[in-house]
Amino acid sequence: MSALTVDPASAQGHEWDDLVRIREETDAPEGCKVEIIEGIVTVAPPPANSHNHIADLIQRRLYSVIPEDWGIYQTLGVAVPSKDGLYIPDLVVAPRAVLSEPGNFIPAAAAELVVEITSKANGNHDRIQKVAGYAQAGVPLYLLIDPWHSGRPTATLLAEPADGTYRILSSVEYGGKLTLPDPFDLELDTGTFPVG
């Protein structure tokens, strides 16, 4: 992963606009993910096949329970300007109506669920910085799929954001089952997730 450092001052007003402009002008190879994480524009390589497999398994299950006027998006940016962040979660569940505005990202607070699947090289972004960003934005549910967690692949569901932190609702090692609460009421069997 490469990073382009931008003015370390908190991105407020014009500085936020500059960060977004730099992100949009970053010439990254096709399939790479260009995000802003704590004021730094980052470029991550395309995910591994196992990563995409997990995203597909979760997405297929989610389609069976979401309302007709919601969508599941794989390349949608979610903005958290207060944390100098513009993330591209592996999956975002949000009402379709929030995509009516022009651009290529939505306010993170408009998401109902974000799913991040860690990669070996940059898992701490998903485990630390993005947890804080999503919580501060008030995203109700954050599902962290972590095949690289201390040698024990895990799935962790975080909820009830308050004061920039989440409460852990459930954490299971691969093989266990994890239940997404209302409005999803969905049990995920992590035993079907590939490792690595």
Image (tube, rainbow, N blue to C red):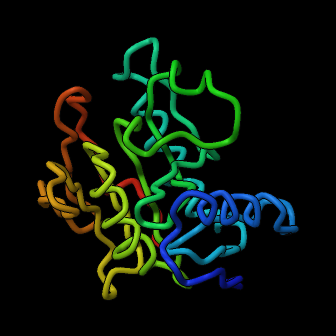
Q: Is residue 75 above or below residue 8?
A: above
Q: Is residue 57 left or right of residue 67?
A: right
Q: Is residue 55 left or right of residue 145?
A: right
Q: Position of residue 180 (x, y in %)?
A: 22, 40
List the single residue furthest toward the top.
Answer: 68
Q: Please state which of residues 130 and 136 is positioned toward the viewer in this rendering.
A: 136
Q: Is residue 16 left or right of residue 29?
A: left
Q: Please state which of residues 141 and 104 is positioned toward the viewer in this rendering.
A: 104
Look at the image and tell me in which quarter the N terminus lies. bottom right
Residue drawn at (34%, 22%), measured in percent from left and top? Answer: 65
Q: Is residue 84 above or below residue 90?
A: below
Q: Is residue 112 above or below residue 39?
A: above
Q: Position of residue 153 (x, y in %)?
A: 33, 74
Q: Position of residue 83 (x, y in %)?
A: 42, 66
Residue drawn at (70%, 30%), measured in percent from left and top? Answer: 102
Q: Is residue 81 left or right of residue 73?
A: left
Q: Is residue 173 above or below residue 148?
A: above
Within the image, what quadrant is residue 112 found in? top left
Q: Position of residue 117 (x, y in %)?
A: 46, 63
Residue drawn at (45%, 76%), measured in percent from left and top? Answer: 125
Residue drawn at (82%, 67%), measured in percent from left and top? Answer: 26
Within the image, what quadrant is residue 24 found in? bottom right
How many dots with numbers? 0
